[in-house]
Image (cartoon, helix red, strand yellow):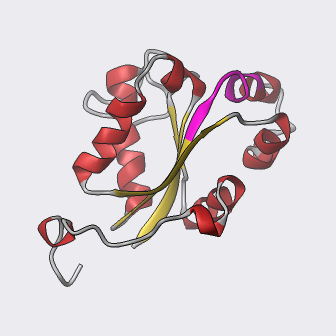
Amino acid sequence: MERTLILLKPDCVQRRLMGRVLARFEDKGLNIIAMKMMRVTPELAKKHYAEHVKKDWYPALEGFITGGPIVAAVVEGLEAIRVVREMLGATSGLKAASGTVRGDFSSSRQMNLVHGSDGPAAAQREIALYFRDEEICAGEPTIAPWLRAADE
C-alpha cells in the first residue's frame, strides 16, 4: 500500500467542498487513515513549499495557504500517489479535465482547491510535516476484499 498527503486548501474549505472532495477518494476505494482541520502557519508553509520560497510569487502562495483553515489527510491505497493526482487533474483549474476535482470545481489557475504529493519521497516528507506517527490510524477496512483482488 502507498500513502500520500492531501491538503484541502482554504478555497476548498471556504467553498464547503470538503465532503464532496473526500467522498471521491473514498468512492475510489482509497482509505483515509489520518485527517485533521488546522491552520498552516508561515513556518509550516515555508517547510512544505521549501523549493518555492525564493521565487517571486512565493509570498502570494504563503498568503493563500495561511489565509484560512485547511484539512490535511493521509490517504492509502494501491498506487495512491498516481491515482490521487489523476483524480485531482491539471494544476490549473482552467486546464483540468472534466471529471477531475479541479476540472469540476476550480475555475482558477492558482486557487486549485487541493494539494496531493507528487512522488513517494515528497509524500513521506509531507506526511511527516502534518502528522505524528501516532495520529495515523492504518488498518485494513472490512470492505477491502470487495475493492481489489487478493493478490493486489
Q: Residue at x 20, y 84 (%)?
A: 151
Q: Residue at x 66, y 23 (%)?
A: 68
Location of residue 7 by image quarter: top right
Residues rendered magenta in the picture: 63-71
* Left or right side of 40 for 14: left
Q: Is residue 34 above or below residue 52?
A: below
Residue 53 part of the magenta segment: no
Q: Quadrant of the N terminus?
A: bottom left
User: In terms of depth relative to the viewer, which is nearer, 132 or 123?
Assistant: 132
**Can see residue 37?**
yes
Q: Residue at x 62, y 59 (%)?
A: 127
User: In terms of depth relative to the viewer, which is nearer, 99 or 113?
Assistant: 113
Q: Is residue 69 above or below residue 26?
A: above
Location of residue 57 by image quarter: top right
Residue 65 part of the magenta segment: yes
* Left or right side of 147 for 92: right
* Left or right side of 69 for 138: left
**Can see residue 109?**
no
Q: Position of residue 12 (x, y in %)?
A: 49, 25
Q: Residue furthest bottom?
A: 151
Q: Position of residue 82 (x, y in %)?
A: 40, 57
Q: How many marks?
A: 0
Q: Quadrant of the C terminus?
A: bottom left
Q: Position of residue 139 (x, y in %)?
A: 38, 72
Q: Is residue 75 above or below residue 71?
A: below
* Left or right side of 132 for 5: left
Q: Position of residue 70 (x, y in %)?
A: 59, 33
